[in-house]
Image (cartoon, grey):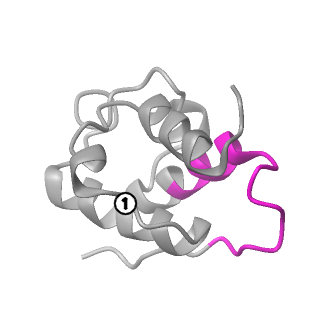
Amino acid sequence: MQTRPHTGSLHPISQDLSDRVRAVISIYLDLPRELVVEEASLSHDLGADSLEITEMVMVFEEEFGFKIDDNAADRFLTVGDIVRHLHHLVGVQD
């Protein structure tokens, strides 16, 4: 079982949100950062199974300080889905 990375919350939540999401995914799945693009499918392209996606959601909740609704998390198919949802939670426009 992988350990949950914590990249720290020293920056404002809207600063480089996409980069922070991609960094967490890259660390958690032990993948090169350049593979973790917003269009990448979590399961097909990045090889994450449902348990890993669930655990990453918990990391995002800790990292960004928001509760992510289970129904929303079930719709996370791509890296971009996560980024857009977190942007929505903080009221940041794409």
Q: Quadrant of the N terminus?
A: bottom left
Residue that extends furthest to the left in the rendered view of this protein: 50
Residue 32: x %, y % from top left = 54, 43
Q: What is the quadrant of residue 59 in the picture?
A: bottom left
Name the kind of residue labelled 1 in the image.
Val
Name the side, left or right, on which 73 lies relative to 37: left
> Is 51 or 81 nearer to us in this picture?
81
Instruction: Read off the residue under disc 1.
Output: 57
Q: Residue at x 25, y 36 (%)?
A: 75
Span of residues in magenta = 7-24
Residue 27: x %, y % from top left = 52, 60
Q: Quadrant of the C terminus?
A: top right
Q: Residue at x 42, y 67 (%)?
A: 67
> Is 9 or 92 nearer to us in this picture?
92
Q: Residue at x 69, y 47 (%)?
A: 17
With respect to residue 34, does 27 lie above or below?
Answer: below
Q: What is the quadrant of residue 56 in the picture?
A: bottom left
